[in-house]
Amino acid sequence: MAEREVTLSVIKADVGSFVGHVQAHPDMLAAVRKRLAEAKEEGLLEDFYVANVGDDIELIMTHYQGSDDERVHKLAWDALMDATQVARELKLYAAGQDLLSDSFAGNMKGLGPGVAELTFVERPSEPVVIFMADKTEPGAWNLPLYKMFADPFNTIGLVIDPKMHGGFKFEVHDLVEHRKVTFSLPEELYDMLVLIGSPSRYCIKHVYARQSGKIAAATSTQRLNLMAGRYIGKDDPVCIIRCQSGLPAVGEVLEAFAQPHLVAGWMRGSHWGPLLPVAEKDSRPTRFDGPARVVALGFQLCHGRLIGPQDFFADIAFDRVREQVLELADHLRRLGPFEPHRLSLDQLEYTTLPLVAERLKDRFEDIE
Ligand code: F6R
Ligand code: MG
Ligand code: MG
């Protein structure tokens, strides 16, 4: 008989926060936990953990219903609606922001919340790390995923672990044209970098180990602003990584965040800024609505139970990168509304550009 597969689902949304776009309210989290606890009681969920990174609520759930399961997605939708209700009652900011529909229809696709799911046979020991970011976009994972799974300067296992030496496959999504392509690394590294170096358009969706065929990583890749047809914020992404035993070690996975890298997002989703690795309790974007934060929670799965979390970036080993990030943030802020701090015009096309272009269109004259 085939072994039973467990599914790890991370579904997240910003459904309101205080003060401004800073943090989900504890009463919202309590409402979500209540709904998920009932589902665990009823047996739909095996286990769950509710995280809060900035103004986003992340539902981390394990179950045996498979990916894209209607009942699990409906549960997440209902839980996020409960939180929205609390946000409305407290007149919190942007209540219900990411829920683009009044009702649930089949699964989360196109409805607003971000989804990353992995379905697999649980190994004898199954360490996973869940990364959750606020005030940035799904492409923010491109560079760290490249480092974890393709860069021997980050992941020495690629060189000296015979179980990893065969490399990894990367499924890359084109968020504009809605198509995907899979690259086999290391052979196709240079081709892949042409695409993933443009993270606002191309995002790594899944990573697979070539030798074992195991799925190793999944990200949330929806672009809310493209779905909504108007600007309603960046899609503050999540990412799940399986670790160890032929996959990158936990320390190799975390090492990908040991040097600052710039991501799009920050104030009004319109600026480049460095990604700040922080403990969950420090994930409150303040200065210029940022800088963008990333939290890393680790769990051991145990027959579907979530043993954890370990709040990895609480560690003092990340103090230095935090210092560097803050210094970089100072430099970029001095540029104010100028590129390369502010995003380029084509990346701003869902914000003010159409309005300004419309107003100015009759005032432009041809240059002789
Ligand atoms: C960025 C973000 C914030 C808001 C900003 C303006 O993703 O959520 O930086 O864009 O605070 O918010 P509004 O337009 O709601 O006043
Ligand atoms: Mg918000
Ligand atoms: Mg957010």
Image: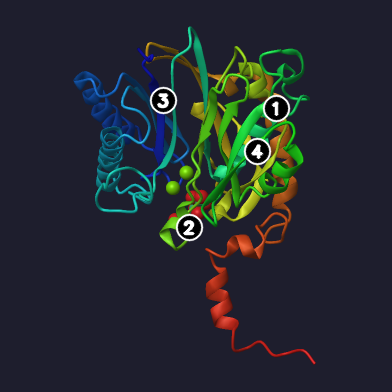
**Amino acid type, mark 1:** Ala
First along the sequence among labels 3 and 4 = 3
First along the sequence among labels 2 and 4 = 4
Q: Residues within 10 Å of mark 3 (few under 14, many from 20)?
A: many
Outermost residue toward the left?
Answer: 42
Name the residue: 73% across, 44% down: 191
Distance from the alpha carbon under mark 1 to that under mark 2: 31 Å
**Amino acid type, mark 4:** Phe
Distance from the alpha carbon under mark 3 to that under mark 2: 26 Å
Residue bearing the label numbered 3: 8
Tell me where residue 60 sits by quadrant.
top left
Distance from the alpha carbon under mark 1 to that under mark 3: 26 Å
Residue bearing the label numbered 4: 183
The numbered mark at residue 258 is 1
Viewer-nearest of discs 2 and 4: 4
**Does the Cβ of the disc 3 residue fall within 8 Å of ligand 3?**
no
**Amino acid type, mark 2:** Leu
Residue bearing the label numbered 2: 226
- Is 207 placed left or right of 152 in the picture? left
**SS of the residue at dot 2?**
helix
Q: Is residue 188 visible?
A: yes
First along the sequence among labels 1 and 2 = 2
Distance from the alpha carbon under mark 3 to that under mark 4: 24 Å
Q: Nearer the viewer, residue 331 or 307?
A: 307
